[in-house]
Image (cartoon, helix red, strand yellow):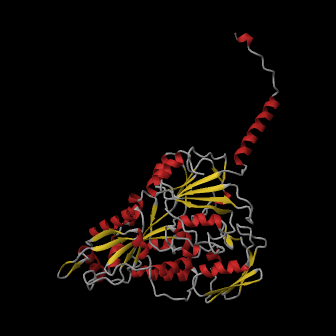
Amino acid sequence: MSGNRPIARPVAAAGWLMLLVVFFCGSATASTTPRYGGTLTVELRESALNLDPAKWRPGAPENAASLQVAAAIFDRLLTLDRFGRFQPALATDWSHDASSRRWQFVLRPGVQFSDGSPLTASDVAGALEELLVGTVAVKAEGSRVVVQLAASTPDLLEQLASGRNFIYRRTAEGPLLGTGPFLLSDLPAAPATGVARYRLAASEHCWAGRPFLDEIQVNLGVPPLRQLFDLQLGKADIVEISPDLVRRAVQENLRLWASDPVLLYALQVGAEPGPAQRSAPGRPHLGEALSQAVDRATMANVLLQKQAEPAASFLPQWLSGYAFVFALEKEDPRPRESGVDSAAKSSAAEARSAPAGVAQDGVAPPLRLRVDAGGDLAKLIAERVAINARQAGITVQVVQTSPQARAANSARSADTAGLRLVAWRYSSLSQRAELDAMTAAWQLEPASDEKGPADAEALYAREDRLLAARTLIPLVVMSEHVGIGSAVRDWMPERWGEWHLADVWLEEPHPVAAGAPR
């Protein structure tokens, strides 16, 4: 039977080599050349988005999802690349006077909003007047925008290149207009499944060119475990991975990306404790006792499965550049105690053995720890704080607050005789602006329009003073993790957590599952 097989014609070795080269080069080109088209499906935990940057509450973790979607709809005046260099966006040039109080920005010509109308200097001035914090005057001068500030602001570029400082136009009705690569094509629907959906379509008027994707579908209110399953089944392309599922995702060989630490959990101590909680003479303040009692390393490594880092400062290392100094002092407190005599040290030791919540005439009610940070993770951290406090003789009762109560209490300090577990999501690339926002939101120092120096030494001294007050105790900082589908290419977000969905493309047409809404 073998004799009946057709005889292959001989091919020269050079011919085989040429065929192999063409084959592999063609395969490589097909897999690395960006292609246009397709729908990117993004799933988020948040049940609703707020696409009005002026209404975002500073530091609110729920703003993170809104910021990611807003970054696909709006542009900023400038951006910061991965090498720390400012790059033009809606502004092509900028300058300032010697005092860094008066800034001028030259706008890019020919930029259009998503409805085809031109971007004007008045549009930019109107947006910046709503967004910039403090005493500031913004006016349009032809194709230029002039920003006049009351105090020297050398870090204005860092502020304008990050956070909520997008440029938009308000209309009489409907969503804000942007100049970004996508536009909101469908308003969110609320189907029977309870999952709201946004649809973003590629903008044909984007000054930077049309994005690769035809559209982005954003599904809201998707639980973390379901997001993981949808990623595995190919029903989603970009999902959020909660800290408790990171290890599982790694074991299942899913594509993951992690930002630098961008989420801080902290313990806020009532500024004026009641008589039962007020420290006795010779004993440390309640905040000092709690700061010494909490076991940050166990929180980060055991409770959060090494998906967090112990926090010894308000600002993270990647933002401030000096946070490691506070971490070293936390590990070896001897330099801080150099001026403390032995009597004070012994009294501090007594405070650990004597309950801080015990009045002299009897046992006081436990301290109430209100969990103002949302999610099950915040409650776990609060319960760990209560355990550590109990080990130090301080009785703490954890109280979970509703979302409505959290919103109402967002601008208040801790209860008079209580505690709050709070969360802060970093968004600004300006150290001073971020610290200003934190101190204002949590009332850590008297309100003032005066801007202090922006250099690292002055900011370190300011943060050191605020930490010493022990009215806000940093606990842990966490990164954000994202699961990425196998067809997603050129996923290149910023290390501080901002996505660039306009750069993403899909290697193959993304099929829509049967019965999926269009």
- At 56% from the left and 86% from the top, the residue drawn is 451
Q: Is residue 330 visible?
A: no
> Left or right: where does residue 386 sit relative to residue 211?
left
Q: Nearer the viewer, residue 68 or 2?
A: 68
Quadrant in which the N terminus appears: top right
Residue 278 drawn at (x, y percent): 28, 83
Residue 324 drawn at (x, y percent): 50, 71
Q: Nearer the viewer, residue 399 or 331?
A: 399
Residue 306 drawn at (x, y percent): 44, 58
Residue 135 drawn at (x, y percent): 59, 88
Q: How many labels does the image show?
A: 0
- At 47% from the left and 74% from the top, the residue drawn is 314
- At 50% from the left and 73% from the top, the residue drawn is 59
Dividing the picture into quadrants, the one containing residue 156 is: bottom right
> Left or right: where does residue 150 sit relative to residue 22?
left
- Residue furthest out toward the left: 361
- At 72% from the left and 44% from the top, the residue drawn is 30
